[in-house]
Amino acid sequence: MKYKAGLLSLLFIIIFISGCGAGRTDELTVGTTGQMARYTQIDGEGHPEGFEIDIWNEIGRRMGKTVRFRMGTLTGLWGMLDSGSLDSIANPTAATKEREEKYLFTAPYDYDPYVLVTAESGEPFSDEGIQSFQGRSVCVAAGTNLSLVLDRWNESHGNPVKTGYLDDQSVLLPAVMNGTYDAAFMLRSGAEIAARDLHMDIHIHPSRIPVLPAVFAFRKDGRGRDLSVQVSRILQDMKNDGTLRQMSVKWFGTDLTVPPPEEAVSEKNG
């Protein structure tokens, strides 16, 4: 009897553990940082909200699955995706050549241009793009698509920009306003929120760096392959029926789901 009881206990533990991570057929487990304004942020009750969160909740609804969000740093979330604890990540993600060796990606769903933000009281810069910031210090959030894009541009042009890596998006503009950095490399939506809603005295300059569209990433395993196909199809349906556009306008006041006409779009970076 003790032997049977032990086997039953072990079986229960195995079932419990297997149900705690990604893999349940009735559930999608999605990681997010909650640190990108309007994309993924924390509401007054401590729950994630934003453009990415709305997209995943709608994906779950159309798939007939519950979406469970898990919080973490961006570096930690990639590790959780690798280990099978997550199905995907609800933060703007770029499909680079290096990442394509390891992950599967959906079709693009977001095209938010890159900008350089300076203090209104600081030295004036032209709007000729990042070339105007040669020899200057530019801060960017570490471990993000933005840091990847800036690093690639900098390396391919002989490292003319002095790059500083900060912990998250929220500390970029304060570092510019207090004079620690000449500019912050950001998404245009975040810069416009700072100027319009937070009334920060800033200048927003186009970077002239081609936009790398945002996609969702999945592991290269059976579940990941199935989900990447299903989610890509649902994203296309959401584009066709106007749902994606409505979500973008809700959070940003503009449609970021189509390529910006004034910017080139890069399918790969590096």
Image (tube, grey):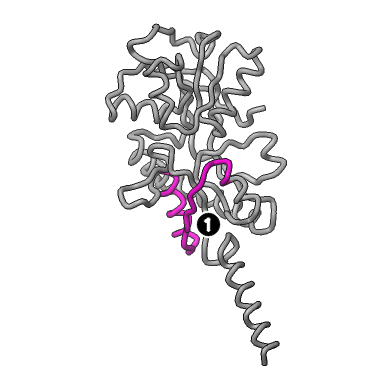
Q: Label 1 sits on what residue type? A: Thr
Looking at the image, residue 230 lies above or below residue 164: below
Q: Residue furthest front?
A: 2
Identify which residue is drawn at 30% across, 48% down: 44
Near-viewer residue (18 or 106) = 18
The picture quadrant where one finds residue 158 is: top right
Looking at the image, residue 156 lies above or below residue 254: above
Q: Which residue lies under the disc numbered 1?
A: 29
Q: Determine whether, in the image, residue 16 is placed left or right of residue 116.
A: right
Identify which residue is drawn at 40% across, 45% down: 242
The picture quadrant where one finds residue 246 is: top left
Looking at the image, residue 41 lies above or below residue 209: below
Q: Is residue 159 highlighted in magenta? A: no
Identify which residue is drawn at 58% across, 54% down: 87
Near-viewer residue (128 or 12) = 12
Q: Is residue 55 highlighted in magenta? A: yes
Q: Determine whether, in the image, residue 160 is placed left or right of residue 241.
A: right
Residues shaded magenta: 51-77
Bin the neighbour count of mark 1 within 10 Å (Cα to Cα): few under 14, some 14-19, many 20 and up: many
Q: Quadrant of the N terminus?
A: bottom right
Q: Residue furthest right?
A: 101
Q: Residue furthest bottom?
A: 1
Q: Quadrant of the C terminus?
A: top right
Whole-percent x, y for residue 169 in the image: 44, 32
